Image (cartoon, rainbow, N blue to C red):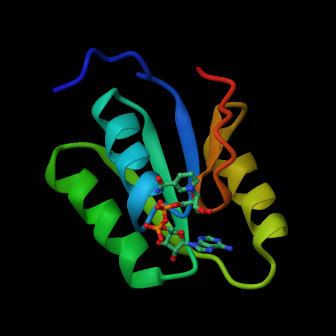
Amino acid sequence: MGNGRLTGKHAVITGGGAGIGREAALLFAREGAAVAVADIDAKAAAATAAAIAAAGGKSAHFELQSQTTRLVDTRSKTWANGGLTLSAALFQGTWPGP
Ligand SMILES: NC(=O)c1ccc[n+]([C@@H]2O[C@H](COP(=O)([O-])OP(=O)(O)OC[C@H]3O[C@@H](n4cnc5c(N)ncnc54)[C@H](O)[C@@H]3O)[C@@H](O)[C@H]2O)c1
């Protein structure tokens, strides 16, 4: 159970199917964000989204292929809507925060 620190926020997380991205997706959802989980591994993205839903969170998932940037841009407009985007697939250790 989180503290609702991201309630009302939308997040797009690339690499959300495993590792840092998956943990970030679960954490963001626990804090109340609606999370779009993006990964080149569609099954892994679906599994993260299912884990969020099973915990009562709000999520969607989609597969990223070669047009990663364009897809993320498009989905971000729909989902993040000025919210949060975390590229865990190519994590550089920076995140602007909510
Ligand atoms: N784990 C660490 O301690 C650590 C430390 C510093 C940096 N990093 C870097 O952070 C990144 C993630 O690390 P991790 O340990 O979470 O890796 P991981 O392998 O556990 O998970 C990476 C996820 O990203 C997905 N992915 C790979 N390329 C993608 C792409 N182009 N678009 C969308 N999804 C993609 C994979 O399918 C996988 O689900 C890596 O670039 C890694 O080098 C990791």
Relative to 23, say whether 97 is above or below. Answer: above
Residue 45 sits in which quadrant?
Answer: bottom left
Q: Which of 74 and 51 is in front in this view?
A: 51
Relative to 43, say whether 37 is above or below. Answer: above
Residue 67 sits in which quadrant?
Answer: bottom right
Relative to 6, say whether 84 is above or below. Answer: below
* Residue at 54% across, 64% down: 15
In which quadrant will I find the N terminus? top left
In which quadrant will I find the C terminus? top right
Q: Nearer the viewer, residue 24 or 1?
A: 24
- Position of residue 14 measured from the top left corner of the image (x, y, whole percent): 59, 60
* Residue at 57% across, 80% down: 40
* Residue at 28% across, 34% down: 30
- Position of residue 51 measured from the top left corner of the image (x, y, whole percent): 22, 59
Relative to 57, say whether 16 is above or below. Answer: below
Is 25 placed left or right of 73 in the picture?
left
Outermost residue on the front side: it is 93
Q: In which quarter of the image is ligand 1?
A: bottom right
- The total number of labels drawn is 0
- Position of residue 81 measured from the top left corner of the image (x, y, whole percent): 69, 37
